[in-house]
Image (spheres, rainbow, N blue to C red):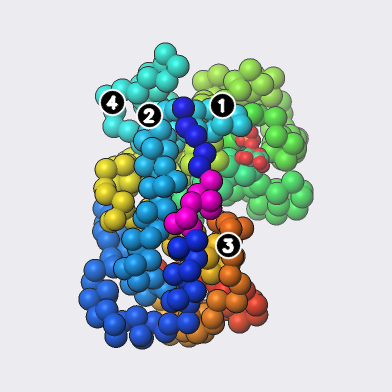
Amino acid sequence: MTTTVDVTRNPLWKKASGHQQAIAELHLRELFDTDPKRGTDLTVTAGDLYVDYSKHRVTRETHGLLLDLVRAAGVEEQRDAVFAGEHINVPEDRAVLHTALRERRGATLMLDGQDVIGDVHAVLDRVGAFTDRIRSGDWRGATGKAIETVVSIGIGGSDLGPAMVHRALRHYADGPEVRFVSNVDPADLLSNLTDLDPRTTLFVVVSKTFSTLETMTNAQAARRWLTRALGEDAVAQHFVAVPTNVDLVAAFGIDSESTFGFWEWVGGRHSVGSAVGLAVMAAIGRARFADVLDGSRRIDEHFRTTPLESNAPVLLGLLGVWYATFFGADSRACSTTSASRRRNTKRSVRRSARVQLERCRNCSPNTWTTPSSGSAPTRRLCRRSDREVEVSAEEGQ
Ligand SMILES: O=P(O)(O)OC[C@H]1O[C@H](O)[C@H](O)[C@@H](O)[C@@H]1O
């Protein structure tokens, strides 16, 4: 059973707050002058990732203090509870097992009497076989034409994961074109359909409940667009479903053979490793999709087994808490490096902490990301915000 600890009542919290006040005005240059080895020591590796947090506003003392807080908060126990399939989603009384989606074939994890890993691979195999058929042109639409475009309809957790992964991996895409529709404003669907041919279009309706208003409204509109051109019988060849609630799918007219389930114990964007990622698999192929799952598993293993001191997800999470809560930086800008990004960093680093918080007000900052460091929104955020902004840089290719 997992318990929640109010770490803000721990004396360590006050200590961290005092420490923040002591170092808040220090320039990064001073931090390097007093600790020249921080550039190599305040770094960790996780799989292929090299994480350098030496340019952040932390010292070795900050590192130690924050890790003490992590231990006091019981993060290690909570982490182990995640991997063990305990019901850490307390309000919904559910396990949170996205890690099971990338477990190796043959591993075992029993959840409520059911072998979760066996189920995961059975569905991945079906999705793989289906997307192979789409990619090879073996799966035909109602008029006998191969599928050229896959339109994934979903919202929230049933859209964000696949849309993000597809965007990140678009340079590996060698299958049908993939588009994502989530907005209930009909303009979103219509603008995506306007240049498509119903004869070569396949819709993937992704919805855990298969009853979300936005998704079902868009799915019904897409169905009308298709059946107006090809007739009711075409639905079976042009629609597939990714639900947990299989019963509602049949009523929509989607075949059970074209229904790829997922589970109550996975939620949000992390479900992309399941059948929710079907459109991504269609775009990049099952082998590359398996590579994504392998990489995710390596990070899971790192998170599960690496001591907290050099545990990348823990340290990056702590940086978020450090800035958001102790510096009052309620926004985080992530950007690739370049001269203009460096200017933003300097400006942000110069900015002194304006808000001192005694208690956790905002443990999770808003994250602003941009593929190009020259991006106007991030620049504007840094220049106009009267709050601290955490700037993290990702080295461009
Ligand atoms: O997958 P669905 O049941 O269609 O739900 C899709 C989304 O609906 C809402 O936006 C919820 O806030 C999200 O948490 C959920 O991911």
**Percent x, y of residue 353:** 55, 76
Q: Callout 2, which amino acid?
A: Ala
Q: Main secondary structure of the magenta part?
A: helix
Q: Is residue 370 visible?
A: no
Give the secondary structure at mark 1: loop
| Number of residues whose C-alpha sits closer than 10 Å to that of mark 3, classed few (under 14), some (14–19) or many (20 or more) | some
> Label 3 vs label 1: CA separation?
32 Å
Q: Earlier in the sequence, mark 4 or mark 2?
A: 2
Q: Earlier in the sequence, mark 4 or mark 1?
A: 1
Q: Nearer the viewer, residue 262 or 378?
A: 378
> Label 4 vs label 2: CA separation?
13 Å
**Residue at 27% over, 74% down:** 38
Q: Callout 4, which amino acid?
A: Ala
- Span of residues in magenta: 6-13
Give the secondary structure at mark 2: loop
Mark 3 = which residue?
358
Q: Is mark 4 within 8 Å of ligand 1?
A: no
Label 4 close to label 1 by CB (< 8 Å): no
Ligand 1's image quarter is: top right
> Label 4 vs label 1: CA separation?
25 Å
Q: Callout 3, which amino acid?
A: Glu
Mark 4 = which residue?
107
| Residue 25 to residue 19: above or below | below
Q: Is residue 87 visible?
A: yes
Given this view, does label 4 or label 2 mark the residue nearer the observer?
A: 2
Corner quadrant of residue 364: bottom right
Residue that lies at the very extreme toward the front in this rendered image: 11
Q: Earlier in the sequence, mark 4 or mark 3?
A: 4
State the mark number for residue 84. Answer: 2
